[in-house]
Structure formats: C-alpha cells, structure tokens
Image (cartoon, rainbow, N blue to C red):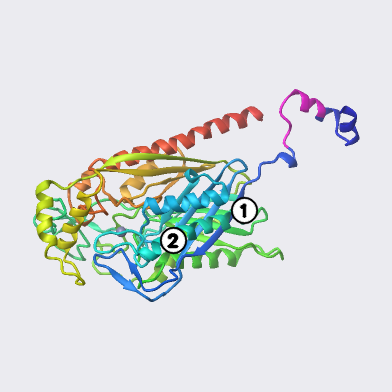
Amino acid sequence: MTRYFWRLGLTATFLVGLLAGPMPTNAADKKIFRAGAFAIDITPLELPVLVNGNMNAVSTDTVNDRLHARCLVLDDGTNQAAIVIVDSCMIPRSLLDEAKEMASKATGIPTSRMLISSTHTHSAPSSYGCLGTDADAKYVRFLPPQIAKGIAYAQKNLAPARIGWGMGRDEKNVANRHWVMKPGIAPTNRFGGTKDDTVMMHPGHNNPNAIRAAGPVDPDVPVVSLQSPDGQPIAVLSAYSLHYVGAKALSADYFAVFCEKIDGKIRGVSTLTGKPRPPFMAALANATSGDTWLMDYTQKERRKYDIEGVAEDVSSAAFEAYQKISYFDWAPLVMEEKLLTVGVRMPSAEEVAAAKEMVKTIEAGKNMSLEQIYARETLLLNDMPPTRELKLQAIRIGELAIGSIPNEVYGSTGLNIKKDSPVKTTFVIELANGCEGYLPPPELLKLGGYTTWRARTSCLETEAEPKIRAAVLELIGKVAKERAEEKAVASKGR
Ligand SMILES: [Zn+2]
C-alpha cells in the first residue's frame, strides 16, 4: 500500500495528512456548483383556448407571442433544486404537484426541491377556474407533462457554473393600485362579504375623494446570475413586483420581453472566448404585486406606457445590478418546504341563500354582472372545504434567500419578510406552488376593496397573512441556520 503511494510520487507529508485528519483541498475533491437551464414552449397545441384573469371568460385562437416554462436546475454537488417560472396567470397546487411528480420520476430531484411559480400574465390559457372563467380542460392536461419535460431538459444541461446575485431597483413601474377613499365613495360588493368598503382599486388621477395609497410597494429587482467558470452567461433569474402590464391574449406580457432584453444586454457585453456560447435563459418571476400596478395615482396625469418600455426599464435596472455581481465558484444550496393549513372566510347561511337567488338570474352564454360572478363564487366556496393547505418554501444559495408563497402577495408582506430575514439578500416569489388568492394583511382586509371580496381568488382567513409571513420567515430561519454551521466549519478548517 505504502509503496503504491510512493510510486505515484506522493509526498510523505501528504500521507501523514491522509492518516491524521482531513485532506487538504486539491483539485480532485473541490466542490463543483452546476447549473442547467431550459425554456420549454407551453403555447397550447389546440386552439381556441380559454383565458383567465378577467371578470368574464375570454376565448382566443390567436398566439401573439409564445409562452414558456423557464426551468432552472441548480446543483451544489450534494443537493439539486429546480426553479421554474411559468407564463401563466395562476396554476393550482394539484396541477403543479402533478408536474413535480413527473419531473421527480425523470430527474430524481425530490418534489420538495422544486419551486414552480406563475408570472401572472393575464393573457395566458386558463389553468384554474376563477371568477367568470373555468379552467381550459385540454390545456390542463397539456401543461404538467410539459413543465416536467422542461425540468428534465434543464437537468440534462447541468454544467459547472459560478453563481452570484445583486439587487437592482426600478421605482418607475410600481405604485399602489389600492387607495383609501373618503367615506361612502368606494364601491361595496354585496356578494363580496365586506361592508362599507373604504378602499377602492384604481381611483384615477386627481380624484378629490382619494385620500392616500393603502400601502407601500417594493421597487427591488433581484438578479441571480449563473455563468460558466470562464464567465459565459448560462441563466439569469430576476423578479419584480409589478402585477402585469397587459397584453392581447395569448401573450406572455412584459415578462418575456424582459427576458429578451436582458439577454441582449448581457450577451452583448459577455467576453468572447472563441468557444461556442452555452445556451442562455432568462426568467422574470412575479415578486409581491397583489396591490401593485404601474399607474401612480399621486401623479396629476395618466402616464403613457407599453410593454416594450416597461421591459426596457426593468431589464435596465436588472442589468445595472448584474454588472456589479461578484461570483462564487461554489455556494451551498439549501431548501425547506412546509405545508401550512389556514382557514377560509366561509359565507354564512344567509349569504348562501341570497347567492342562490342571484345565480338564478345568470343567463347561459351571456357575460355575468359583478354581483352574479360573486354570487356564483359564494356557492362554489360554500361547496369547498373550510381550510386550505398551502405549500411554502425557502431556498438559500450562499448569502441569498428566496421565500415562496402561493398567493398574490401585497408589497408590505414582501418588504416585511425582507426586513425580518436573517439573510442579507432576500426576496419573495408569489403565486408559487399553487394559487390561493389574494393575501391582504388583516389591517387592509378590513378596509375592503376588490382584492378582499370573497371568491376563490380571495378567501383565506383574516389572519392568513401574518401566519404565512411567520411560516416563511421560519423556513428562511431554518435554511439560514445551516449557514451558521457552514461558517463554523469553514473557520475551524482555516
Ligand atoms: Zn391578479
């Protein structure tokens, strides 16, 4: 044995080290971080298709631009995780769990290490019945296997990578769309479960009855960058708290234009080494935009905007942060998942009885009125269980943490999670791993307004927001705890 080592030319010092304790780091046992990306086309094969995100059902047979599930697989040598951003308004947990099961069978990545979120484009096929639109039955069958394939292809693309992150800022395209109004001004929906609403959405400019925006917004543009060891861009994951811009269906809205633009900005400046460039993928997740849109009602005039301009602003903010990123050759990848059961604001017997009368007035093939829509929602909720089981997650990559919530999350919730997170760079991805509706904090829920009206898209109990926020912070605390241990190990080894 000894002679064998000597023959290999190993020094006596090395052998002592081998017998006495941990080996010094050499090239062979250096930890390798890897990343693989793949954007799979999820444009429906069969048209027309139902589109949700509007009060009443819309059907289209036009593809204005392609839809994708943008899949990123990360691997720290011990753990793998998948992060997928889907061009969809919202996808229920059942469909995502189905996609994860299929992807897990194909890749070996545990389902608990997959985060799949919707961008919340309002111009995509309906995967979930809400308000006046049902799910599109054919698309619901098409989507899960397609997402699973995307994750498997991303895993096949795994290659050594370095990772870094930064935080940009775009204040221009985030403003609170909810305003506190003078008494008696905000509309109240008699089938929405609220009384004497004082908050309304989109009060307009120079409205003398508008008092103040109902809450803060988050202008952050986090950027996570993956590059090959020699600096070739592999993928960028970003997020922004803008509800959407608005596009004609089918369309991925500004989310896809952001991806094209950041690709142009990044690859335009990448160092050319003469080697073929690896494929590049960008993805823009929705951060916390439940109460956030781009129209600022503190301004005197309505601004002009379009998808192109918004995508240019947000991608420029992301690119500014990108240029300042410092990279790590290796970083630990830690992920935790938790199921949290929360109650539902169930309608009362009287509300159900009134709703039954109202739905009798619905005429087949005709658009429903607001009251008819919410009466129908009242009956649908009444037939559903009084609790919901939510899937919450936290991912940590080195000194970066990502929390995920399956709701349309308000700006204040995201800002509070960032403030209370033990990890310096933290951001939240909403509508991840399910779609459980708007999540107004209790103090805002009691003010009423569209996003509080009881429906499948807003039905969780009054205290849901603090419970969910605490649970996500607990998960971030858990993934951050190992960080302290990593540091201890690192300093002992030094
Ligand atoms: Zn929405």
In x, y percent, where is residue 118? 40, 57
Near-viewer residue (438 or 240): 438
Which structural element holds mark 2? helix
Residue 19 magenta = yes
The residue labelled by disc 1 is 158
Expressed as whole percent of the image width and height from the top left, the position of residue 474 reads 40, 35
Q: Which mark is residue 143?
A: 2
- Mark 1 element type: loop
> As shown in the figure, which amino acid type bears the numbered disc 1?
Leu
- Where does the N terminus fall, quadrant-wise? top right
Question: Which one is in front in this view, the residue at disc 1 or the one at disc 2?
Answer: 2
Q: Position of residue 399 (x, y in %)?
A: 52, 42
Q: Would residue 489 be seen by someone viewing this image from the given angle?
A: yes
The number of callouts visible is 2
Ligand 1 found in image quarter: bottom left
Instruction: Give the answer, above or below, for where 468 lies relative to 11.
Output: below
Q: Residue at x 90, y 29 (%)?
A: 3
- Classify 10 Å Cα crowding around label 1: few (below 14), some (14-19), many (20 and above): some
Region of the chain picked out in magenta, as a range: 15-25
| Relative side of 303 to 402, left or right | left
